[in-house]
Amino acid sequence: MRAFVWGPAEFVGLPPRWLVVEGILVGALATTAIIGVGTAGVWAGHPALAAGEGGLVIAAALALYLLITGAGRALVGIAATLGLCLALLMPQAAAWLVLTQRGEVRPVVVTLVEGGPGTGIEDGRYLCSVTSRAGVPLSARIWRGCGGSTRPGDVLTVVYDPKGAVLPRGVAPGADRGPLLGVAALAVALVTGCTLAVVRSFRLIPPS
């Protein structure tokens, strides 16, 4: 039962170096693929890839590979969960990257303020409907920079993607690096989980 859940790991002392390298390589390739597909999808404006679907497929393929190698079911589940979380977080991090690299900052005029505590909007946020200085309404409501003291006619700063692949958002994105830090943490955890799963999956001493 222990071998089924955590992998056989039938070796004495430290695992061979080549086995550790193989585990790191598997984790690094899966992580790079999930991040690369997610970033490319958002950058190019591909709907399916931008939504993280490509990353989910890669995470599923990783889980299948670990099962085939004989990894413990618990470690396969951990690696698959980390891969899924990374795939779902990538759209936010990629949007941050797109707006940082090619976003343009412009002032907009508030036309309507909605939300706030007790309104049922997530986290009690205030949402501002805005238009450009020319009177063209933006397709997305802005919450960054929109607060209880904001009134119609106020001017907010938004950053938007001139190619339209990412929705505009309030203020410059450089101050909001939460998704990027989350991606980095998940990437390290996924490589570590894959390495542990691969190392424990092999029977280095044949059963007697």
Image (cartoon, grey):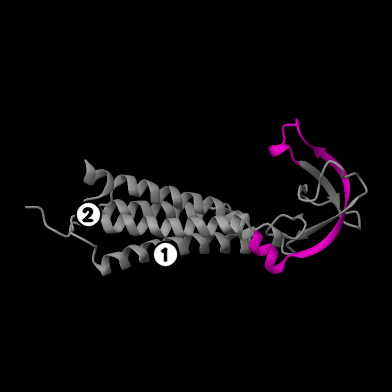
The reply to whether callout 1 and callout 2 are in contact (CB within 8 Å) is no
- Amino acid type of the residue that numbered disc 1 sits on in the rendered structure: Ala
Query: What residue occupies the far top of the structure in this picture?
Result: 118
Query: What residue occupies the far front of the structure in this picture?
Result: 13
For the residue pair 24 and 161, the one nearer the viewer reads as 24
Quarter of the figure with residue 189: bottom left
Task: Indicate the position of residue 44 as horizontal and vertical percent values.
Answer: 62, 64
The boundaries of the magenta stretch are 96-125
Query: What residue occupies the far right of the structure in this picture?
Result: 153
Which numbered disc covers residue 9? Answer: 2
Between the C-alphas of marks 1 and 2, the distance is 21 Å
- Residue in view at x 71 percent, y 68 percent: 102
Which numbered disc covers residue 101? Answer: none
Task: Assess whether residue 88 is covered by the magenta stretch.
Answer: no
Q: Decide if residue 53 is in sight here.
A: no
- Amino acid type of the residue that numbered disc 2 sits on in the rendered structure: Ala
For the residue pair 184 and 63, the one nearer the viewer reads as 184
Task: Indicate the position of residue 77 as horizontal and vertical percent values.
Answer: 37, 46
Whether residue 125 sits left or right of residue 9 in the image: it is right
Task: Indicate the position of residue 5 as horizontal and vertical percent values.
Answer: 27, 44
Quarter of the figure with residue 162: bottom right
Task: Assess whether residue 118 is covered by the magenta stretch.
Answer: yes
Task: Indicate the position of residue 165 as horizontal and vertical percent values.
Answer: 68, 59
Q: Decide if residue 51 is in sight here.
A: yes
- Residue in view at x 11 percent, y 57 percent: 206
Residue that label 1 marks: 28
Instruction: In the rendered view, tell whether residue 16 sits above or below residue 63.
Output: below
Disc 2: CA contacts within 10 A as few (<14), some (14-19) or many (>=20): many
